[in-house]
Structure formats: structure tokens, C-alpha cells
Image (cartoon, rainbow, N blue to C red):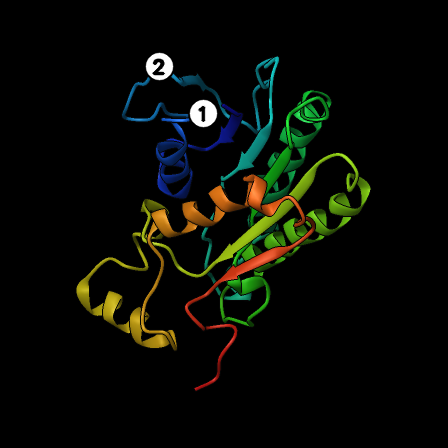
């Protein structure tokens, strides 16, 4: 039974990971809102990861940082604060969590960290300047820490395409927009949270013990293929 800390496990991809891990592992969720379920293996702390002190946790084998943002505007409409806020949510929050729990992770069993990027960090997409810049920072963090912690802790990132979560509700707000999104992807689909959770589950498992410093595209072909 692993001790897993999830930052942002009350909704979306984080919640899908939480639900898939609860039966066999102890899960600590840290987010502003509590998950909609209770479970003997679940402990929840309500706080803002950017503003509040993170709780002391004695045993941590895995850290998963899920908070993100979808802030899509033309460059002329993006303020410096937009760039700062996206960087804070996606990079600084992850760094804060890693620095907090690194000492206990070092003592963990097959310790690992999973962060989240986006396909927009690889594929040039209009109106994604702020979020792509922030997520490129996440990918740089994964590469650097992967090398720095190579003998102790594994760290990887998942870079999903659009995923059907509340965060993406504005982009998938009606059937026509959903159909258009399906057609944009060469493999004719887009992600469900449970698919991304499955990749996270693999990356924290013993089967991934040789993998670190990697960014895994889950893209339905939008980055990989030109058809």
C-alpha cells in the first residue's frame, strides 16, 4: 500500500486518479474543495496551495501535482499578470509541493512524482502563449529534476490534449464544439479523465521503474500525425 499525495484531487484528472488509487493505497488530497466522496483511505486538507502552508505528512511515496489553467487569449489581450498567474499555478505550485515533500519522498518506497504539461507546449496553437509558456516550464522542471534526483526519485509529466473536465467546459460546451474537437484529432477523439489517470497510474507503478525525466504525449495524434 503506497502513500500518495495528490494536489488538486477534487476535480477532473486529479479526481480520476484519486478514485482509481483509493482502494489499494492511502491517498492524501490537498485542494481548495473536498472530493465528493469519503473513504477510509482518504485524508483531505482544504487549502490554497499557492497561498497556504502545506500540511506536514510523515510518509510520502508518490506526489502528483494536478492544478492547471486554460487561459486562451490573443497575445495582445494577455496581460503580464496573466503570464504570472499561469506560471504560478502550473510551475511555482509544483515547485512548492516538491520542495515541501522532497525530504519524505527520499525515504519513500519507489518514490515518484508526476506533473502535467499540455500538447500546446509542443504544438504551436494560436491563443495559447501564456499556458504554453508555463507548461514548457513544467517540462523543463521534469528534465532538470529527473537528472538531479535520478538515483533517488523518478519524475515524469503527462501532456494531454483537451480532456473532458470542468476546466475545459468552455471549449466543449456543446455538441457541435465536441464534434469539431473530435475532427481536429487524427485519431478522432479527445481524452476522458480516466484515460489520463491510467497513464499516471502506470508512471507511479513498479512497471515504470526505468522511466524518469520523460514527458508523455496523450494527443489522439494531434501532435504526432499530419493527415
**Whole-number angstrom distance, CA of label 2 to CA of label 1:** 10 Å
Residue identifier under label 2: 40
Q: Is residue 68 visible?
A: no
Q: Residues within 10 Å of mark 1 (few under 14, many from 20)?
A: some
> Looking at this view, is 94 or 62 the one in front?
62
Residue occupying image coordinates x 20% and y 69%:
176
> Looking at this view, is 20 or 145 the one in front?
20
- Residue 144 shown left or right of residue 46 in the figure: right
User: Of helix, strand and loop, which one carries label 2?
Assistant: loop
**Vertical comparison of 125 with 57: above or below:** below
Residue identifier under label 1: 25
Image coords of residue 151 (percent x, y): 79, 38
> Looking at this view, is 63 or 207 the one in front?
207
Image coords of residue 146 (percent x, y): 74, 46
**Vertical comparison of 70 with 31: above or below:** below
The quadrant of the picture occupied by the C terminus is bottom left
Displayed quadrant of residue 61:
top right
Q: Residues within 10 Å of mark 2 (few under 14, many from 20)?
A: few
Most extreme residue toward the bottom is 227
Q: Is residue 63 visible?
A: yes
Residue occupying image coordinates x 33% and y 26%:
35
Pick whichever of labels 2 and 1 is earlier in the sequence.
1
> Looking at this view, is 156 or 135 the one in front?
156
Residue occupying image coordinates x 64% and y 32%:
110
Image coords of residue 55 (percent x, y): 57, 15
How many numbered marks appear? 2
Residue occupying image coordinates x 69% and y 51%:
213
- Residue 106 shown left or right of residue 219 in the figure: right
Marking on residue 119:
none
Amino acid at each position: 500500500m503506497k502513500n500518495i499525495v495528490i494536489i488538486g484531487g477534487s476535480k477532473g484528472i486529479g479526481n480520476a486518479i484519486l478514485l482509481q488509487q483509493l482502494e489499494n493505497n492511502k491517498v492524501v488530497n490537498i485542494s481548495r474543495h473536498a472530493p465528493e466522496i469519503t473513504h477510509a483511505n482518504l485524508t483531505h486538507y482544504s487549502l490554497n496551495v499557492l497561498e497556504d502552508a502545506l500540511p506536514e505528512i510523515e510518509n510520502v511515496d508518490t506526489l502528483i501535482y494536478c492544478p492547471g489553467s486554460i487561459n486562451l487569449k490573443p497575445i495582445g489581450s494577455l496581460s503580464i499578470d496573466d503570464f504570472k498567474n499561469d506560471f504560478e499555478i502550473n510551475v511555482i505550485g509544483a515547485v512548492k509541493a516538491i520542495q515541501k515533500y522532497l525530504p519524505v519522498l527520499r525515504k519513500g518506497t519507489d518514490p515518484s512524482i508526476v506533473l502535467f504539461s499540455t500538447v500546446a507546449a509542443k504544438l504551436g496553437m494560436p491563443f495559447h502563449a501564456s499556458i504554453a509558456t508555463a507548461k514548457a516550464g513544467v517540462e523543463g522542471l521534469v528534465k532538470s529534476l529527473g537528472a538531479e534526483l535520478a538515483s533517488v526519485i523518478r519524475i515524469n509529466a503527462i501532456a494531454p490534449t483537451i480532456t473532458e473536465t470542468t476546466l475545459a467546459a468552455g471549449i466543449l460546451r456543446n455538441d457541435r464544439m465536441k464534434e469539431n474537437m473530435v475532427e481536429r484529432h487524427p485519431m478522432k477523439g479527445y481524452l476522458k479523465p480516466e484515460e489520463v489517470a491510467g497513464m499516471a497510474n502506470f508512471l507511479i507503478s513498479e512497471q515504470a521503474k526505468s522511466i524518469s525525466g520523460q514527458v508523455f504525449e496523450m494527443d489522439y495524434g494531434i501532435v504526432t500525425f499530419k493527415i
